Amino acid sequence: MSYNKENYRRVMAEFSKKNLEAKTDAEKRRDELHRLFPEIAKIDSTLSQTGARIFGEAMKGKAGLDMRISKLQNEVNELSSIRAELLKKHGYPEDYGAVHYECEECEDTGFVGEKMCKCLKTALVMAGYESSGIGKLLKTQSFDTFDLSYYKGNAENFRRMEANFAKCRAFAENFDTKAPENLLMFGGTGLGKTHLSTSIARVVIDRGYDVLYVSSHTLFSEFEREQFGKGDADTRKYFDSELLIIDDLGTEASNRFTVSCLYNLINSRLLDEKSTIINTNLSHSELLNTYQDRIASRILGEYTQLPFAGKDVRMQKLTAKNG
Ligand SMILES: Nc1ncnc2c1ncn2[C@@H]1O[C@H](COP(=O)(O)OP(=O)(O)O)[C@@H](O)[C@H]1O
Ligand SMILES: [Mg+2]
Ligand SMILES: [Zn+2]
């Protein structure tokens, strides 16, 4: 797995900033204490030399070292409790001068030893949701909210959708950049193609992969903007992401230039062994009519075909609501 690099850089920068701020905030609070209460300043100055003093005792030789160290330890304990008393007397919490990290486990560094801390993983997943382009859809669409009973009207449709659902779940749970697979979801409007692809995206992002979702409309217009230098389009990300989801292929305004960009994208991803999911309302023959043979043959030949069937779920939901 490899989190989106741009997100990783940004999140790590945020962590460094948090870690530094926690330290400087603590320093400010300690300075404040020292300014107001010289006794505490004196104690802190003594306590800060503890390490050096232990070292000094050790250098004096082994004879009676244990005793000398334990004497030193007692002194430190006593000073600490005097310090705590002073803070209490002046109405400050005992840990007022201590560093308060957002995550005590990794002290806001994102790492515990070599291992990524849970808090960093969570931050990267959140950033992944954000940068995936799915945004709002992720709130309502997941495997858990996908209801197969909408397809019960017809036994064959039901079996088909049950198989699609199982396939999508397995695709997400087993997603592996070393074993790339492509999906073509095709069928009428409102049958759950977008819903199942965002459900896949969520699971794959949760598992730490870099996912990008884009409508074919946006994709084609970004190719054009990049070519004709309007705005700051960057189509590189569509080639780079570990999983790319192109939604609603066939609804875009296309021309020869954009179609050749699409070919280039699909072909490059196949050659680079990167997984792609394409959703479309077009049938196979419509795909063949709309795009060049070399595009259609790849989408039909190199993608696992998932035919969607049933009655428009959006309409079913509306009818149910309106009685
Ligand atoms: N099986 C399902 N269970 C629950 N909601 C569904 C299901 N299929 C579709 N929906 C919902 O119906 C609406 C249309 O589905 P969508 O996935 O956009 O269809 P498509 O992409 O095939 O046109 C969305 O709001 C989606 O969440
Ligand atoms: Mg859709
Ligand atoms: Zn942490």
Image (cartoon, helix red, strand yellow):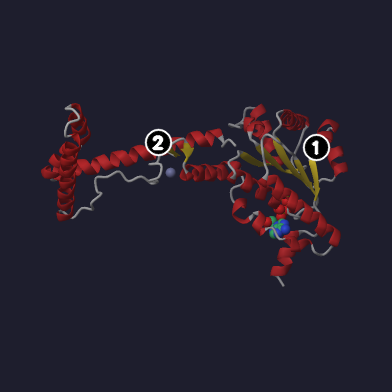
Q: Amino acid at mark 1?
A: Ile
Q: Disc 1 designates what residue? A: 299
Residue at image x 72%, y 49%? Answer: 168
Residue 312 pos. (x, y %): 77, 58
Nearest to the observer: residue 278 or residue 286: 278
Q: Quadrant of the N terminus?
A: top right
Tell me the crowding category of disc 1: few under 14, some 14 to 19, or many 20 or more residues within 10 angstroms, Cα based. many
Q: Amino acid at mark 2?
A: Ser
- Element on which disc 1 rests: helix
Q: Disc 2 designates what residue? A: 16
Residue 21 pos. (x, y %): 33, 39
Q: Quadrant of the C terminus?
A: bottom right
Closer mark to the observer between disc 1 and disc 2: 2
- Looking at the image, the residue that sits furthest to the left is 39
- Element on which disc 2 rests: helix
Residue at image x 88%, y 42%? Answer: 285
Mark 1 or mark 2, earlier in chain: 2
Residue 8 pos. (x, y %): 51, 35
- Looking at the image, the residue that sits furthest to the bottom is 323
For residue 147, which numbered disc appears in the image?
none
> How far is mark 1 from mark 2, CA to CA?
44 Å
